[in-house]
Amino acid sequence: MRGSGRVATSTRMSMGADYSSDGGRATAGLGAPVTVLGLETSCDETAASVVRLTPDGVATVLSSVVHSQIDDHAAYGGVVPEIAARSHVEMIEGVTRRAMAEAGLGYDALDGVAATAGPGLVGGVMVGLSFGKAVALARDLPLIAVNHLEGHAVSARLGEPVAYPFLLLLVSGGHCQLLEVRGVGDMTRLGTTIDDAAGEAFDKIAKALGLGYPGGPALERLAASGDGSRFDLPRALLGRKDCDFSFSGLKTAASRLAQTCETEQDKADLADAVQKAIARQLGERSDRALKDYADHHQHRLFVVAGGVAANRTIRSTLEEVARRNGFDFLAPPMAYCTDNAAMIALAGAERLQKGLVSDIDAAARPRWPLDEHKALADPAHRPGRKGAKA
């Protein structure tokens, strides 16, 4: 689920975090602040940001510039990988130059360069990662290859003080996961989608309704005037007691119903039904995860991140689920829900503080699970499945 329009923003925000020596985390008060350039090119936004992180965990976003390719892809109803990659090549140098200028810094003020190395459209990922390598080599700086999903996982820490650990629902156009987050490089997957992500369902159903691209925000606007009670949409995985998700059945059923809509009110009613159905499934699985998490942890914080976290209906549903379970609820500022480079820079800065840097030959990865052990031991997509998600 994506934002709309071409965006170029510069923000300055601070946040704090608690650090201890547990799990290799940097101890507060040691060392000097680190300033990191972050680069993000995993899909259809070319983004660069500069973040400064102090030893006691206080971060300041010195700049955050995002160039969106929405106009380039609108005619096709979705992201075209080749167009996206070519646009990244054209824009990455200018966007980075602007981020450095708005931060008021030269490259000699940087302590490291962080770049998304996956998962994502691999052609785009290669552009940002290669540019990051070039800066690192030219300026003799450490390179930090960052998992795009890890960027989303820490993005709430760009808005206000957040201490590890916390329970995370990562919900975006390509991903839907519940994770226990103990710090960068230290996360356990509790549940994931077995087919489509929530944001993908939003966009594909919006396309079936003729709402254009990006579909998610358009469907949310249309749903505001709808009455979803008219439509009975399927509910997935009702017999299972785990925290996994499934949206393919809902996507198929709603797309077929979209063909029967004759008026704008029909479309609005279906859009409302879809939005509520997605919110309900996210709420049900999150409720299950929160109850299990509460049995093992005293620190009760539920964080929701990713592009779909910008949807107000979903946000309010999840806030209510958190409240019922005695959890505090937190979502990133709207500017950091969708793809951005500030979250990549922050993840890179946290890794740099822990001494977790990458080799200069780090590879771009189209797929890169946050919990690689769980992904290998209990894959969501079994061997033999065909297609991109195999």
Image (cartoon, rainbow, N blue to C red):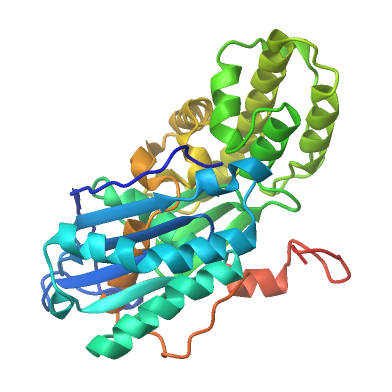
Question: Looking at the picture, how far across and down is residue 187, in whole percent?
Answer: 49, 65
Residue 390: x %, y % from top left: 78, 67
Q: Is residue 229 left or right of residue 147?
A: right
Is 159 or 330 nearer to us in this picture? Answer: 159
Residue displayed at 35% across by 49% down: 156
Report the residue at 48% width, 85% height from top: 362
Residue that extends furthest to the right in the rendered view of this protein? 384
Is residue 296 shown above or below 125?
above
x, y percent for residue 169: 52, 47
- The residue lying toward the viewer, choosing from 150 and 220, is 220
- Quarter of the image for residue 329 reads top left
Q: Is residue 27 left or right of residue 127?
A: left
Mark count: 0
Is residue 198 visible from the viewing direction of this image? no
Q: Give the left or right position of residue 274, taking residue 96 as reference.
A: right
User: In terms of depth relative to the viewer, which is nearer, 252 or 30?
Assistant: 252
223 in relation to 10, above or below: above
Q: Position of residue 85 (x, y in %)?
A: 55, 65
Picture layout, residue 167 above or below residue 361: above
Q: Is residue 191 above or below residue 223?
A: below
Residue 318 visible in this rendered orientation of the protein: yes
Residue ID at (64%, 53%)? 191
Query: Split into 4 quadrants, where in the image is the N terminus?
Result: top right
